[in-house]
């Protein structure tokens, strides 16, 4: 089991920035591709960003390109979501997720492990 715990959510004004953190435990973090997903009220969960285990490959949803980045620090068993130029439509519960297969995170939206989520609210 890979346990994932998100933190860093909160309330921010439009145009501001937030940094979400995801701390992993239970397995060798370096073996896992990681990603972030989000779910807004009344909407389906959607992919936000993904990063391969060796940091060589990343993918972003069109809606967050040039605003969000997904750094990871394997030595700290952590992945982050740096969110800049926030918009009200970014309001959602954000979930950290991981899988040993990159494509499961980046393209198939079916990572094996999920965190509990952290709320991000952007006011206009």
Image (cartoon, rainbow, N blue to C red):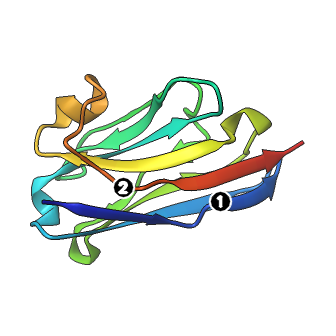
Q: Quadrant of residue 79?
A: bottom left
Name the residue rendered at 77%, 47% in the picture.
122
Number of marks in the image?
2
> Which quarter of the rendered picture does the C terminus lie within?
top right
The residue that disc 1 covers is 18
Q: Position of residue 85 (x, y in %)?
A: 73, 45
Distance (Cα) linking label 1 and label 2 = 18 Å
In the rendered structure, the answer to whether residue 54 lies left or right of residue 4 reads left
Please rate how many residues cluster around mark 2, counting C-alpha atoms within 10 Å: few if below 14, some from 14 to 19, many from 20: some
Q: Residue 115, which numbered label?
A: 2
Report the side of 75 relative to 85 (left or right): left
Classify 21 as above or below 71. Answer: below
Choose top left, top right, bottom left or bottom right for residue 50: top left
Viewer-side residue, 32 vs 115: 115
Residue 41 location in percent, x, y?
A: 65, 33
Q: Position of residue 54 (x, y in %)?
A: 17, 53
Q: Are marks 1 and 2 in contact (CB under 8 Å)?
A: no
Which residue appears farthest toward the right when viewing the image? Answer: 124
Q: Label 1: how many residues lie within 10 Å, few (<14), some (14-19) or many (20+)?
A: many
In the image as oriented, which residue stretches furthest toward the bottom?
76
The residue lying at 25 percent from left, 51 percent from top is: 55
Give percent across and percent down for residue 102: 18, 36
Task: Name the secondary structure under disc 2.
Answer: loop
Q: Name the residue: 54% across, 35% down.
A: 39
Out of 65 and 44, give the one closest to the viewer. 44
Left or right of 109, for residue 82: right
Q: Earlier in the sequence, mark 1 or mark 2?
A: 1
Considering only vertical position in the picture, is 111 above or below 19?
A: above
Quadrant of the image containing the N terminus: bottom left
The dot on residue 94 is: none
Q: For the residue labelled by badge 1, is the local secondary structure a helix, a strand or a loop?
A: strand
């Amino acid at each position: 089991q890979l346990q994932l715990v998100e933190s860093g959510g909160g309330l921010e004004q439009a145009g501001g920035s937030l940094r979400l953190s995801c701390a992993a435990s239970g397995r060798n973090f370096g073996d896992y591709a990681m990603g972030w997903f989000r779910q807004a009220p009344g909407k389906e969960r959607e992919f936000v960003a993904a990063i391969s285990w060796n940091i060589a490959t990343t993918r972003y949803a069109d809606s967050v390109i040039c605003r969000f980045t997904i750094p990871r620090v394997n030595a700290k068993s952590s992945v982050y979501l740096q969110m800049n130029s926030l918009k009200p439509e970014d309001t959602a519960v954000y979930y950290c997720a991981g899988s040993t297969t990159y494509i499961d995170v980046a393209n198939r939206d079916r990572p094996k492990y999920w965190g509990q989520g952290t709320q991000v609210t952007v006011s206009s």
